[in-house]
Amino acid sequence: MNLEGITLHCLSEYLNDKLLNSKIVKISMPNKNGVLFVLRKNNSTYTLFANMNGDSPVLYIPNDIPKNLDIPPAFCMLLRKHLENGRISKINQVDLDRIIEFEIDLLGNNNKIITKKLIFELTGKNSNLLLLENNIIIDSLKHINITQNSFRSIKPLAEYIAPPPQNGVPILEKNADVILESFRHQDIKSPVNMLVSATTGIGKDSAKQLLFEENLDLQEENTLEKSFTHLKNSLPKIQNDIINNNKFTVVISKQNRCKTIFPYTIFYHEPNFTYQVFTDLNEAINFAVSLNPIQLEDQELLKKLSTNEIVRLEKKLQVLNTDLTKANNAETERIIADTLMANLYQIKTGVSSCELINIYDNTPITIALSPLLSPNENAQNYYKKYNKYKRAQKEVVQQLEETADAIEYLKTIENSLDTASTKEEITEIKQELVDFGLVAPLNKKKAASSQKSTPLHIKFSNNTSIFIGKNNKQNDYVTFSLAAKNDLWFHVKDIPGSHVVVKTSLNAPESEAIDAAIHLAAHFSKASTGSNVPVDCTERKYVKKPSGSKPGFVIYTNQKTYYATPEQTEIQKLLLLQ
């Protein structure tokens, strides 16, 4: 669970309302990363739990109070010494960052008020809880040295330095026109990354909500223009929801984990996630932490590895395209070399350039020279560049093709990981990444003992079934083992996705079954949230697998293209027919 700055803004207001002026009566630690505060305000008692788990840092009032450790850690004893009987005099969020500060007043010597500060840094894997006085760190839950973080160290008696601030415009204080204006200063192609970089208070999850509406086709060329138009409409609505604090949407992954909590009504439903709405933020957090995740070993790790490799290869693709542009100048280098050789007698040694007449088209040409080389050596240098570029043309083109193919293949892996729901499917995908060279080989015993996964089987009617491959090996099985030559075969056009086959005992499948297969093919693809998704349909006999090609890769002909907009409610009804 990763809570954004705007969600913590609402949390800060909630805690102010509940806990301001309360007295700290007891402090304990249920685990090594969590601190529990018992507070009393008027005649009411509250508990506040700060869980600084690196995966899901959170601060909330728990419904179920966790049990304490038998022996309190040293940090717990220190907090008791410094904070018990103190009064919370101020609760404040730092700008719209993921940092909440508590100021705590205590009675010191000579009845003098001493103010100490608790800082809750709810910043993902770098989350921490610090105790300060006069901006000097008394102690912290986690110590960070300069070798771990070059920006700041966190240790007792050191001056507190806050995490690097965000530089964008505050998302709650500015209108869409101001934010769009700030986009002009962002050298980023992705509209989501542009919005995150241009603002403070939100991450990529809220950026998608602000930019994308339901069924927006993210593959369209004018997506950027459409998303900016949507931002102008969505931002005032979201700002109003946050101000009124009346809607909190918990985003739940299919592994039953909370991804985030939005403090507003959402516009955009991401595939493979479900949503639950609450009217109380604290209740939403309690629900989120109560979820019992479904453990699919390695799924998140494999997805991260695949995504990072795609990013790396896309950067490599850019470099290769630059190299190809240079290599395509090979003829220019030869022309310069030939012109130099024809005019050696005119060139003086030691000059850095010369102007000659191109021997091929009689136009003036300015040639850069090395003053350290003779005219003949400069000409030979240009011949070397020519030969190098000629060789590079073939090599770079081959690398471009191989890199592009690898990116497309890894995108199919990404899609498979999005739809995987069993350990067997994850094991098969992991083996693909082993074969690809991205993951170390599996343990032989484990690989031998793992069972094969099975594709989705939807019994559409007494006469017709639909089979869906959820990873590349299942795709090959569905297409080349299950399907007969006259069965209908479906796949999204030019987008990673599942192979879908319709088998029937009738002369031809029902039109409703064909329509269902089209929508299922669109749903089990990278374009599952798009509208008018192109889906190709052909008979299985026209689908071929090139020799030596990777799992899941096919070529096909004689296709007819349909267009579908997957509706989640209808898809769920079909999936119930398994």
Image (tube, helix red, strand yellow):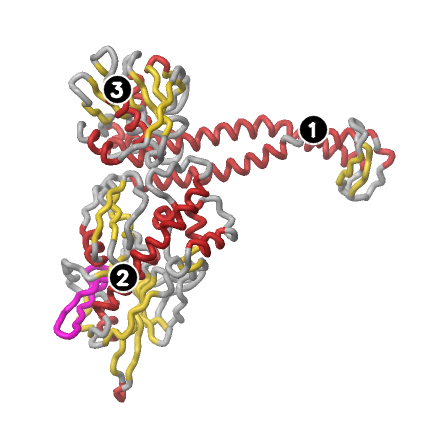
Which is nearer the N-term, disc 3 or disc 1? 1
Q: Main secondary structure of the magenta part?
A: strand
Residue topped by disc 3: 511
Which is nearer the N-term, disc 1 or disc 2? 2
Looking at the rendering, the stretch of residues picked out in magenta corresponds to 29-50
Say whether marks 3 and 2 touch (CB < 8 Å): no
Amino acid type, callout 3: Ser
Q: Secondary structure at mark 1?
A: helix
Residue 62 image point, x, y percent:
18, 60
Which is nearer the N-term, disc 3 or disc 2? 2
Q: Nearer the viewer, residue 101 or 209?
A: 209
Amino acid type, callout 2: Leu
Disc 1 from disc 2: Cα separation: 65 Å
Q: Residues within 10 Å of mark 3 (few under 14, many from 20)?
A: few
Amino acid type, callout 1: Glu
Disc 3 from disc 1: Cα separation: 58 Å
Residue topped by disc 1: 331
Residue 473 shows in this picture: no
